[in-house]
Image (spheres, grey):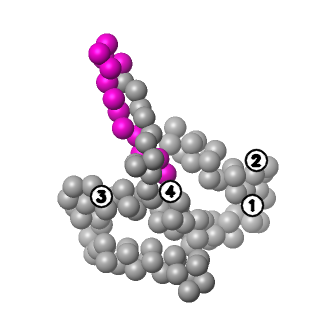
Amino acid sequence: ALAESKNGTVVRKLFGYSHIPQRWAALINAFNQQHLNTYINFHRPCFFPETHTDAKGKQRKLYPYENMMTPYDKLKSLPQAESYLKPGVTFEILDQLAYQRAIVKSGV
């Protein structure tokens, strides 16, 4: 379900619904790895739900604007977030990557 939701909101919006010929696959894959993944993880805001349970026990998900942040910001907000990083990766390294892309995007 997660892959299909990403396809609908990100991939299909960017690449459309038509078949992509195999001769373009390597170029599209390189674009995704170098640019699209960085954009999605560091710069594209997402809603993160809050689950509320009513008196009958039914759970509803609400998406308040206060919970809108990038996936990277969400990761940093988690308790003991450093424990989720791969060995050798630090938030300082990831911050440099995030801010580097932001600077290039803004033209500074």
Please, what secondary structure does the residue beneath circle 3 have? helix
Distance in Å between CA atoms under marks 2 and 3: 35 Å
Indicate whether 10 appears above or below 1. below
Q: Residue 77: give its label.
A: 3
Identity of the amino acid at label 2? Tyr
Q: Residues within 10 Å of mark 2 (few under 14, many from 20)?
A: few
Q: Give the foreground label among 1 and 3.
A: 3
Given residues 79 and 6, the one toward you in this image is: 79
Give the residue number, with chain letter if any, for mark 2: 17
Q: Earlier in the sequence, mark 4 or mark 3?
A: 4
Foreground mark, 1 or 4? 4
Disc 4 vs disc 3: Cβ atoms closer than 8 Å? no
Residue 106: name its quadrant.
Answer: bottom right
Q: Residue at 75% across / 60% down in the picture?
A: 22
Amino acid type at mark 4 = Pro
Spatial distance from mark 2 to mark 1, Cα to Cα? 15 Å
In the picture of the structure, the residue carrying the numbered disc 1 is 22
Q: CA distance from mark 1 to mark 3?
A: 40 Å
**Disc 2 to disc 1: CB gap under 8 Å:** no
Identify the element where label 2 is drawn. loop
